[in-house]
Amino acid sequence: MTLPQVFKGKMRLALITAVLLLAAGGGYLALRGNKTATVYRTEPATRGDIASTVTSSGSIAPLVTVTVGTPVSGIIKSLSADYNSQVKKGQVIAQIDPATYNALVEQSRGSYLNAQANVAKAKVTLVDAKRTLARYQNLVKDGSVSVSDFDTYATAAASAKAALDAAEGSVAQAKGSYDQARTNLNYTTIVSPVDGIVISRAVEVGQTVTASMSTPTLFTIAQDLTQMQINATVDESDIAKVHEGGNATFSVDAYPEELFAGVVTQVRNAATTTSNVVTYSVILAVDNKDLKLRPGMTASVTFVAATRQSALKIPTAALRYRPKTGQQGQQAKLEPGQKRIYVLKNGRPEPVIIGVGIGNDKETEVTKGDLTEGAEIILEEQTTTSAKASSGNPLSTRSGPGMGPPPR
């Protein structure tokens, strides 16, 4: 290698080293230029009305629902009611083909008449046997007839009486079959058991219904859609807050902007366990005079457990906030029923011990403690890195629409 070539190689190596040093120095200066700032999201303590609530969900159903079926099998011959039909008690709503049952009625009627004829015949035979027995009874006394002959006629009379009893039993049996056949014939005419509206129809004309194992359902009739109920499920942790006679509000997806009112009529004691979660059924009575609510709708229910007026209240999220490690310092031990929140003072979080009352997912009542209305309650904090930050002083950010960091 010549001297010029060695010189060029050293120059190239020196140039690469200088570039790397400049890059490292620039990165160091850039890191030194960045400043960290802690931003706190706060909301002020306010006064106002507050309610303790329990949320749940349930389905809307008519207060009284009647399932109409039939105990006989057959082919649906005609239908006189459909979905949403208004029906009256005793109104014919369907007809099963009665031809087979008419034939059974005639057949059982014939058996019944035949049994009655057999009774009449048995009565005649019994009367004749008794008359003969009485005649031979007088003859046996004077020796004109032997005792053995008399015994034969006595046996015949007893047999005639037994035959009559059997014939009368056959009449009772035939009459039962006849009555059953007529009842089954009547069952082929389906009538509404109540006044109401048809909310479900499960059959079509020409369809065969079979009642061998269970009664098939033909219609479901709601007795009164102006009075509805909600069967809501409440977790075991909240069930103590719900009482009979308590008020509740609910919404449905069909009317998302409208709130409906309900009253708790029953808190059932039977528990239901699903995936290790224990719930109880709570029944609400609902007025549906305008017929907006329909059976089967899902209702999002809010039970009102208690209310306070002009209460000092804070965001419930403030109860969960804790400063980052190293900022908390030494903390006083909390007594039962006390909570610790943090207030932003002089740009730093300061702890305040309070007592709490009723609350919900959004707000909690403050009943005790050195907290004043308007105090900036810390909800959360974030640490940001900015090259433009002139110092490490914390910033406050109020939550809510249109609220952002204060001007620098």
Image (cartoon, grey):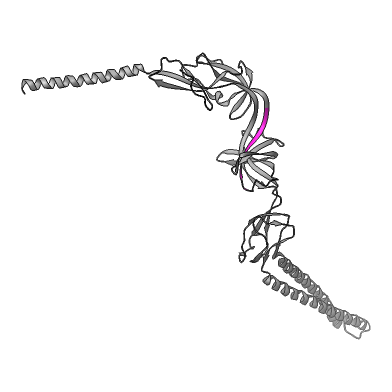
Quadrant of the snapshot with the N terminus: top left
- Residue drawn where x is 78% and y is 76% of the image: 113
Taking the magenta stretch, the answer to whether it contains residue 301 is: yes
Specify start and end residues of the magenta stretch as a single range: 296-307
189 relative to 250, above or below: below
What is the residue that sits farthest to the bottom in this orientation? 144
Q: Position of residue 260 (x, y in %)?
A: 66, 39
- Residue drawn where x is 75% and y is 71% of the image: 174
The answer to which quarter of the image holds residue 34 is top left
Direction from residue 167 to residue 382 in the image, left or right:
left
Q: Where is residue 330 in the image (x, y as percent from the top left)?
A: 51, 14
Taking the magenta stretch, the answer to whether it contains residue 284 is: no
The answer to which quarter of the image holds residue 126 is bottom right
> Would you say the magenta stretch is mainly helix, strand or loop?
strand
Q: Where is residue 256 in the image (x, y as percent from the top left)?
A: 59, 40
Direction from residue 183 to residue 280 in the image, left or right:
left
- Residue drawn where x is 43% and y is 15% of the image: 392
Q: Where is residue 90 in the image (x, y as percent from the top left)?
A: 74, 60
Count numbered badges in the picture. Answer: 0
Direction from residue 88 to residue 60 in the image, left or right:
left
Q: Can residue 290 be seen in this view?
A: yes
Report the front residue among 265 and 259: 259
